[in-house]
Image (cartoon, rainbow, N blue to C red):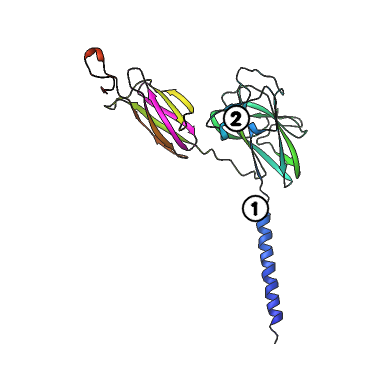
Amino acid sequence: MDSKPKLYLAIVCVICLTAGILAVYLLCYSYSEYTWLEAEDADIVTPDFEIAKDPLASGGEYLWIPEGTGGDPGKGVAVSTIRINTSGDYVIWGRAIAPSVDDNSFFVQMDEGFEAIWAISLSDNWHWDAVNHLGSGEGSYPESDPLIFSLSAGEHTLRIKQCEDGAKLDKLLITNDKSYVPANIVGSISGTVITANETGIAYATVTLATLPGDEILSITADSNGNFAFKGIPPGYYNLTASNTGFWTDSDPVTVKADEVTIADVMLCKKCDLNAGGGSTGRCCG
């Protein structure tokens, strides 16, 4: 009996099985889109929006309405063109800082659609928040969190508009993967400013800087010398402590994601030269 028909049948079966597996894979995985935008790289940015620097921001810069500018709804606009490959429902995430209820909103508009009022969750640190609409709960555009944007394949125009001053915007994500939540990949630093005999130094000034020397944050330790920096991206930094009557000291520190780095800083007390205690370089405890 000729074995060729069986061979051909086997080949056809393999091809069909492979095509079926590929179809299922494409159906499940190929339609997720993730479009990332740096807020400060918008195609058009008009006043009162300004670009400012922050070593903790993605790319070192962010977009904001400076504190004290005052509310002038819709005056400042940041316009970005995005391209969508797959028609469907999308959500928008923003990496932002919103220090208070008076400084936590932008208007968001896609194409010529309605202007959503994005009320950003409050935080003094950079964090991801889904664009929502602070609606009245009535009418054509009720309150929605997250806000769903129905987009066709092709180019669309995203506008971030001025609402309140003080809010900061670093980065944007437009995605049809509604289960995806961008990770806030950060760590923290905790420690104590101490003397040579491990006594806490009250109210010492502690400064965190990048290795190139760009200052990130400067805080005051508590009455026991304790301090903490939160929401710090992983990386290598310099930690500097100072206080009246002590020699300033700097130590390198490494921050890892989702970890608390313990970093105590020891300061040497300056000697009292009038009491015959030695040279300016001597550590007296």
Q: Which residue sits furthest right?
A: 112
Mark 2 or mark 1, earlier in chain: 1
Query: Mark 2, mark 1: which one is toward the viewer?
Result: 2
Residue 7 percent location from the top left of the image: 68, 78
Q: Which residues are magenta?
A: 221-249
Q: Is the residue 235 above or below the residue 101 in the image?
A: below
Whether residue 121 is visible here, answered yes or no, is no
Mark 2 residue element: strand
Residue type, mark 2 in image: Tyr
Is 261 placed above or below 277 here? below
Tell me the CA gap for discs 2 and 1: 32 Å
The amino acid type of the residue labelled 1 equals Tyr
Q: For the view shown, which residue lies furthest in the left direction? A: 276
Q: Quadrant of residue 263?
A: top left
Q: Residue at x 62, y 28 (%)?
A: 63
Residue 195 is situated, as x and y percent measured from the top left of the image, at 30, 25
Question: Contact, CB < 8 Å: mark 2 with mark 1?
Answer: no
Q: Which residue is mark 1?
A: 29
User: Residue 62 — which label?
Assistant: 2
Mark 1, other Cα within 10 Å: few <14 / some 14–19 / many ≥20: few
Assign a secondary structure to mark 1.
helix
Q: Position of residue 198 (x, y in %)?
A: 29, 27
Is 16 placed left or right of 196 in the picture? right
